[in-house]
Amino acid sequence: MDTRPGFSQHIFGDTEFWVPERYINLEPKGGGAQGLVCAAVDTVTQQNVAIKKLSRPFQNVTHAKRAYREFKLMKLVNHKNIIGLLNAFTPQRSLEEFQDVYLVMELMDANLCQVIQMDLDHERMSYLLYQMLCGIKHLHSAGIIHRDLKPSNIVVKSDCTLKILDFGLARTAGTTFMMTPYVVTRYYRAPEVILGMGYTENVDIWSVGCIMGEMIRGGVLFPGTDHIDQWNKIIEQLGTPSQQFMARLQPTVRNYVENRPRFPGFSFEKLFPDVLFPSDSNEHNRLKAGQARDLLSKMLVIDPQCRISVDEALLHPYINVWYDEQEVNAPAPGPYDHSVDEREHTVDQWKELIYQEVMEYESSHGRAQSSGSQQPSPAAPNNSEPNGY
Ligand code: AMP
């Protein structure tokens, strides 16, 4: 392939990475529907970084919209609990040749799927939840309601710091059919998303509740094979919701939901019994287990009108021990242009839009992505910390 000078090639199975020479020691770290993520060392900043390759992000409209939105939002948002962009580039040299986008981020150690398996003590569990809530609150302050938080899109470091990796569903997502070999995980989606209702900010609290419950139980709470199966799993455990809730459903959905068998549900003491909490039950642990269960019982509420809000959760005794005004109420990012979510473009138009975004990023952050002399930067020579991280 004819690529820009100052780039080097790294091959992992059938995936090729072309990155500026400043990045060395590439090692595959994980993969999602969008592409492979590698760990690397940035020789300019001496920092460990993660590099995500978006292969032909414009290959179909769903991929393109997601890549474009993610890139725009990563540029906009700056909060310690949301992944930040350190660099972005394409190895191709023109719009005609344009294929791939690479996003460089701070390297984290593991995703939350791996952490959930561990026996977490109350300190760690409450700190992880606190950081999730801070990140979510920050997204909300920019008008971004995530709706698709899940453990694979949350990453942590061994010092227990946490970052949310993605920005969830676009307002108009959900109807497009995506051809991908990856199964989309829906276990953490709130009832109002599953049932196609309107939603507000506390839709994201449901996902946090599912993650917290999984940390305690050590297994997925509502592992439905599809939306119907998932709804069954929810009502079997939490009970059939009230008439007031049913009344807010669209007629066809309401008809289905009302004709399901009725379930009384279980108490939270039954759903999350004492044995699931740290066993050396000293007074502190007993108190914390009670608080944890109380918080869970306020998050895992089917009717969003009766579910705790993000602000209330941050003030809950299990969480508020970590409360720091700067983290909870960090200045909101610039407003996000939601028309992006509603836009419809052809694949070629998306290709051009994404290419323009990458070019704009490169010129405002220094085009010299290589280790030094090959590509002098017209805009910001040797800019080592592009995004104030
Ligand atoms: P994604 O393509 O963003 O869904 O990421 C896929 C997987 O790659 C995640 O579940 C993580 O295991 C890993 N990953 C992504 N970004 C990072 C990062 N910044 N640091 C460490 N691992 C990451």
Image (cartoon, rainbow, N blue to C red):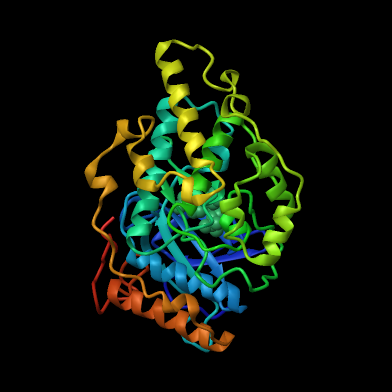
Q: Residue at x 53, y 43 (%)?
A: 301
Q: Give the image location of residue 369, x and y in percent.
A: 36, 69
Quadrant location of the C terminus in the rendered image: bottom left
Q: Nearer the viewer, residue 24 or 321?
A: 321
Residue 325 relative to residue 272: left or right = left
Number of numbered discs: 0
Q: Judge whether 32 appears above or below 102 on screen.
A: above
Q: Nearer the viewer, residue 201 or 359?
A: 201
Q: Nearer the viewer, residue 270 or 265?
A: 265
Q: Give the image location of residue 98, x and y in percent.
A: 52, 82
Q: Nearer the viewer, residue 377 or 165?
A: 165
User: Can residue 211 be seen in this snapshot?
Assistant: yes
Residue 81 relative to residue 31: left or right = left
Q: Residue at x 51, y 35 (%)?
A: 297
Q: Give the image location of residue 8, x and y in percent.
A: 49, 67
Q: Give the image location of residue 357, x and y in percent.
A: 40, 78
User: In the rendered image, which quarter is residue 338 located in?
Assistant: bottom left
Q: Judge whether 8 appears above or below 236 on screen.
A: below
Q: Residue at x 40, y 15 (%)?
A: 284
User: Can residue 37 be seen in this snapshot?
Assistant: no
Quadrant location of the N terminus in the rendered image: bottom right
